[in-house]
Amino acid sequence: MTHPIAPDAVVHVSGLTKRFGSFTALDSVDVTITRDKIHGLLGRNGAGKTTLMQLITAQDFPTHGDVRVFGETPMENAGVLRHVCFIKESQKYPEDWRVKHVFASAPHFFENWDADFAERLIADFRLPTRRPIKKLSRGQLSAIGVIVGLASRAPLTFFDEPYLGLDAVARQTFYDRLLEDYADHPRTVVLSTHLIDEVANLLEHVIVIDEGRILIDSAADDLRGSATTVVGMRRVVDAFVADREVLHRDGVGGLASVTVGRLDDAERRAALEAGLELSPVSLQQLVVHRTHAGSAAFEVSA
Amino acid sequence: MTAVTGLPVTPSPSRAPARLSKGHPMSRVWNVVRLHLTNTWAMLVTPGIILGVIFLANLAIWVIITRAAGADAPEAIEGTQYSGAALFIFVYMMVVAVQAITVTFPFALGYSVTRRDYYLGTSLLFVLLALAWSIVLAALSLLEEATNGWGLGGHMFTSIYFGNGEVAPRLWIPFAGLLFFFFIGAAVATIYMRWRMNGMIVFWVVSLILVVGLAALVTYTDSWPAVGNWFSTNGVVGVASWSLVPTAVAAVTGFFVLRRATPKN
């Protein structure tokens, strides 16, 4: 079976459905992941992010649909899987291992493994290499995953909420090293996260998934301009947004703040002439509005 | 420390390859063996230490018997030929097999190893471990014989289960025995990885029914003497050889069960 796949598609998923008993985790999903870009896979808990990544990396079996990675089916395909690295949220390590054992075994499985880079990252994250895995904190466990994911330099790397327990400094270190190394060694990265604002500047492409369906699949730049918040006197704002789709509405006294879709240049001028203020909408706010969810769901801190 | 700059830019090694290199199948399988042996303690060092401690305890007991029994000592100590002191290693290796699979299977899949390569590598590891331990046990049994039971007439590695004739059966009996326990452990572990607790419940209930059913069948057909006969005519070596049948069934079952297993937490 052949598919018309874009030449720069690294992953091509079509009609992908995954059911667990009566629960549909993924519902006929179509998505393409393009070469050498950093993708954000965003969505609420239980939206289907992990399931999608598990199906793409052949950890789990689809109910229906087709998955292609590097143009081939990944299931039991060593040629494909050797070029994939999947860092799981709660990776379990062998009970009797020390930290150093992870970094001793990983190079056998990733042909681009950079031992010097791994050394530097271990120092950056202050990871005690001789300590038994059992005695590590949640954040230190996450740091192991982050280091393996970065130093493996796999052409296709998945990070599934890799930051659990990492403090703000360590998370920033992760984002900085990812961006630096990505600049030197372009590769395809998929980052699944709740902390949208933190990674917003990293992402080139955004995929939002909700209740097993793809809600947004768009270049990050397009997405940023796709909504604007209009602020001003309630009466004036209401008149301006009267026949537009309203994504979100806030107000205090006589003031209103309303988020609407894309505005063209003429519309922006009209708004400014009417005495309204326009402000960009953050990626996080946009995703929250689009998933029709309370923002609480996205404020789950690491 | 290597400088950050000066890394090769063209051709960038991390770009998705135009043609997917699969690597040599044998090296992929060998990588799984190396993964299991990253920490050698569980497979080699810990059982070695346990074996040493049990051996020392046995020596102490033989000394006590020799002192206490006086003139009757040689006869008393002859009873140690039924010693099961070294048998722990078989059960221990079954536990090793179960742990190796339940812990490293989800981990290896995270390293993007195929289920096939994982199972073949793990099986190769078990064969190599069985070989290594049977050589150790055979060597110790020869040493025990040469030193006349460590100077005390004791039996630990020359107990009746291990044979005391040629070198070949001394190697073959523990080798086949270890293989049996490794692959039974592996099969049970794969059932757990595939169907979790439900799989375990069904497996143990079915096993229990089979064992009780077989025992009942043998009893009702008055076949116990025939069963006893079978064991005595085959001898330890024959039984060891026949154990390869259930070992092979377990090994093949484990392969097909694991092929559809998923690494759920």
Image (spheres, rainbow, N blue to C red):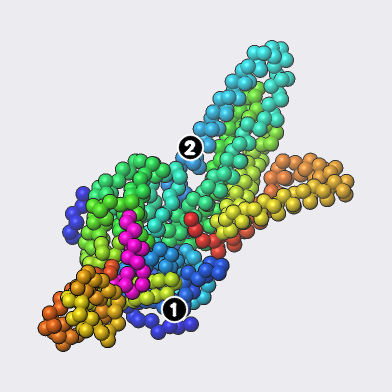
Give yes or no for residue A295 being in the magenta stretch: yes
Q: Residue at x 50, y 36 (%)?
A: B46
Quarter of the view holding residue B261:
bottom right
Quarter of the view holding residue B131:
top right
Note whether A113 is above or below A242 in the view shown.
Answer: above
How far from the left and from the top, in percent, is residue A238? 23, 81
Which segment is the magenta one? A286-302
Q: Chain of mark 1?
A: A
Q: Tell which of B238 and A43 is nearer to you.
A: A43
Q: Amino acid at mark 2?
A: Val
Can residue B8 be seen by looking at this rendering? Answer: no
Label 2, residues with CA under 10 Å away: few <14, some 14-19, many ≥20: few
Q: Amino acid at mark 1?
A: Ser
How far from the left and from the top, in percent, is residue A145? 35, 54
Can residue B79 be seen by looking at this rendering? Answer: yes
Q: Is residue B163 left or right of residue B40?
A: right
Mark drawn on residue B45: 2
Q: Is residue A3 left or right of residue A223?
A: right
Mark drawn on residue B44: none
Mark drawn on residue A14: 1
How far from the left and from the top, in percent, is residue B59? 59, 22
Q: Residue at x 55, y 64 (%)?
A: B260
Give yes or no for residue B214 being in the magenta stretch: no
